[in-house]
Amino acid sequence: MQSEMSLEQARKLIEGSGLVMEAEMGSDESVDLYSFAFNSLLMADKIHAFHFSCESGFQHTHFQEVYETIRDFADELTEITLSGGVAYKYVPMTDILKPEPFTMKMAVDTIDGYIEDLEKMSELHADNTKIANLIDDTIEKLSKEVGLLRSFK
């Protein structure tokens, strides 16, 4: 004979499985994540312009790695957020793409600022393993590229 499970027991079983973590993501939280992903695409375009303006083949290669990393991050963040069942909706920033003359210092400072934004996002979403891991992996990749750009010409 099969015993009946109480609603409370079922809720605890589902919560313990980790299967609904993304589905519990609130609409406001999702809009923030979608907005960060969209703004990351704008940042990738800005870095792509640095890639065109840089002064050496070494810089060219590493700026390409940076903008590809940011684009991949934006795509993955959006897909993880979509898997939570909240429709795509974002709030774009408009100041990311303001024209600036290229200097290595300005370019590296821009990437450093983006890494700081990623670190803040990681803290905000530390309870969501998929998002936190994605952000932390992206920080690691970008930090390596920034270190190389600073150290070598």
Image: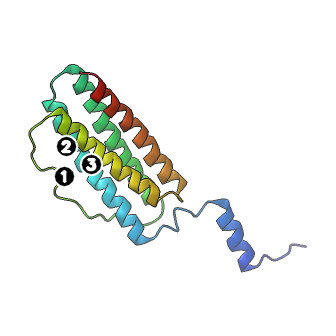
Q: Residue at x 40, y 65 (%)?
A: 30
The residue that label 2 is drawn on is 46
Mark 2 vs 3, N-terminal side: 3
Reply above or below: 35 against 58. Answer: below
* Crowding near the residue tagged with mark 3, few <14, some 14–19, many ≥20 C-alpha atoms within 10 Å: many
Measure the alpha-carbon separation of dots 2 and 1.
Answer: 7 Å
Foreground pick, 145 / 67? 145
Measure the alpha-carbon separation of dots 3 and 1.
Answer: 10 Å
Please report contact status of discs 2 and 1: CB closer than 8 Å, yes or no: yes
Q: Which mark is residue 96?
A: 1
Which three-letter amino acid code belongs to the residue tagged 3?
Answer: Leu
Specify whether 92 is left or right of 99. Answer: right
- Mark 2 or mark 3: which is in front? 2
The residue that label 3 is drawn on is 41
Hey, which quadrant is residue 140 in on the image?
top left
Q: Residue at x 35, y 38 (%)?
A: 69
Is residue 48 visible in the rendered image? The answer is no
Q: Secondary structure at mark 1?
A: loop
Specify whether 80 is left or right of 35. Answer: right
Q: Secondary structure at mark 2?
A: helix
Mark 2 vs 1, N-terminal side: 2
Q: Residue at x 41, y 48 (%)?
A: 76
